[in-house]
């Protein structure tokens, strides 16, 4: 059902690829540029799987480049591929880029597919995930599972996008238990911070010392260290981006899934046909683009009653009965 319903609006365009391509299609030389390693970062890996799926389905290569975690070096690489005529250019970390719009306007003939930020530019295609909705579900489940009445959220850079995760998590937990204590922490922005598992593990230990028995991580390559720290102390972690339940079976309560692979695949298919009708695409619970992972690894941790409650909450979000506040709209989080 998930794959059937996922991203209906975008995938409708993908189905049209059985039709002939336009006679005068624009240049299609796609490139995806990653910060840091692919395999060690759950977000990067999920993007890569979407790229690989496109290549398998079409036989058309999509260039992938790995560069430094330093944003200045990353943007130098982006500038280079733009000058070389690549298009579309996938900017995976739009929320990290300073002066994004002036940069994009330097290349009016280049198409940009950007994640992490939303701007209405004629040559920019924003893929906007409702991480706050998926995180709301994670917070609700964490509150159901917590025995101490204290849970935690850990990320790296204190950015509005990451606050979106944290705020959604808090709202979901408070929806289930208004009295629950939600600890929130960011390890900081520095070189290789998104791969610094020592820092995230230390923060997880600090939170557990303060009573947290469920910790949600949205920390890229530094995230699995949180899950490991929780497992070592007999507590529960929550994964992100992809199904990480199997990393420490019996100690990962769930994972907040983002179907970035399917979104990237669909965006590439759309770009291949030169279809750029909507500059901003929104992917949330309604599109089954975010949600929670349930499998044999976390089955002993999640009772049928808990799953039933999560399904009901998810339905209420989709129907608009529960409105999850998005931190990035006003930089505030309901208390």
Image (cartoon, rainbow, N blue to C red):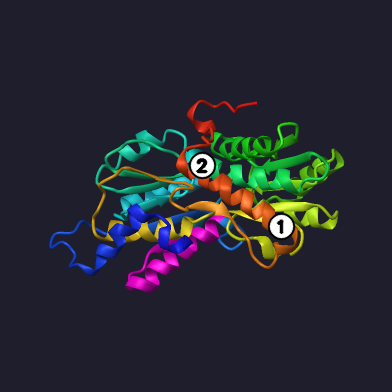
Q: Position of residue 104 (x, y in %)?
A: 34, 40
Residue at 57%, 26% in the rendered image: 332
Task: Answer with left or right where residue 224 lies relative to residue 67.
Answer: right
Residue at mark 1 to residue at mark 2: CA–CA distance: 21 Å
Residue at 75%, 35% in the rendered image: 180
Q: Secondary structure at mark 2?
A: helix
Picture layout, residue 98 above or below residue 142: above
Magenta range is: 43-64
Q: Position of residue 120 (x, y in %)?
A: 33, 36
Q: Secondary structure at mark 1?
A: loop
**Residue placed furthest toward the left:** 23
Do the residues under discs 1 and 2 have CB atoms within 8 angstroms? no
Task: Give me the disc on residue 303.
Answer: 1
Picture layout, residue 296 above or below residue 285: below
Q: What number of labels is visible?
A: 2
Task: Answer with left or right where residue 133 lies relative to residue 304.
Answer: left
């Amino acid at each position: 059902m998930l794959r059937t319903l996922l991203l209906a609006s975008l995938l409708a365009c993908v189905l049209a690829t059985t039709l002939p391509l336009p006679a005068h299609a624009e240049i299609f030389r796609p490139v995806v540029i990653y910060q840091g390693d692919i395999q060690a970062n759950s977000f990067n890996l999920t993007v890569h799987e979407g790229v690989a799926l496109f290549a398998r389905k079409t036989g058309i290569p999509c260039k992938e480049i790995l560069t430094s975690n330093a944003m200045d070096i990353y943007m130098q690489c982006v500038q280079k591929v733009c000058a070389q005529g690549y298009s579309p250019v996938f900017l995976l970390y739009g929320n990290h880029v300073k002066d994004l719009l002036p940069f994009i306007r330097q290349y009016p003939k280049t198409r940009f597919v950007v994640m992490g930020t939303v701007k209405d530019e004629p040559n920019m295609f924003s893929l906007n995930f409702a991480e706050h909705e998926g995180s709301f579900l994670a917070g609700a489940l964490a509150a159901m599972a917590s025995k101490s009445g204290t849970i935690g959220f850990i990320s790296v850079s204190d950015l509005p996008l990451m606050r979106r995760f944290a705020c959604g998590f808090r709202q979901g937990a408070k929806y289930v238990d208004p009295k629950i204590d939600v600890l929130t922490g960011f390890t900081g922005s520095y070189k290789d911070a998104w791969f610094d598992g020592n820092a995230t593990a230390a923060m997880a230990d600090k939170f557990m010392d303060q009573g947290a028995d469920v910790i949600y991580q949205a920390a890229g390559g530094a995230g699995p260290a949180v899950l490991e720290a929780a497992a070592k102390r007999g507590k529960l972690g929550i994964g992100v981006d992809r199904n990480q339940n199997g990393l420490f079976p019996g100690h990962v309560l769930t994972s907040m899934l983002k179907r970035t692979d399917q979104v990237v695949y669909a965006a590439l298919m759309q770009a291949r046909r030169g279809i750029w009708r909507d500059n901003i695409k929104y992917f949330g619970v309604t599109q089954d683009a975010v949600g929670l992972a349930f499998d044999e690894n976390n089955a002993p941790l999640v009772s049928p009653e808990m799953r039933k409650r999560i399904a009901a909450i998810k339905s209420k979000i989709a129907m608009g009965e529960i409105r999850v506040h998005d931190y990035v709209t006003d930089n505030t989080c309901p208390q």
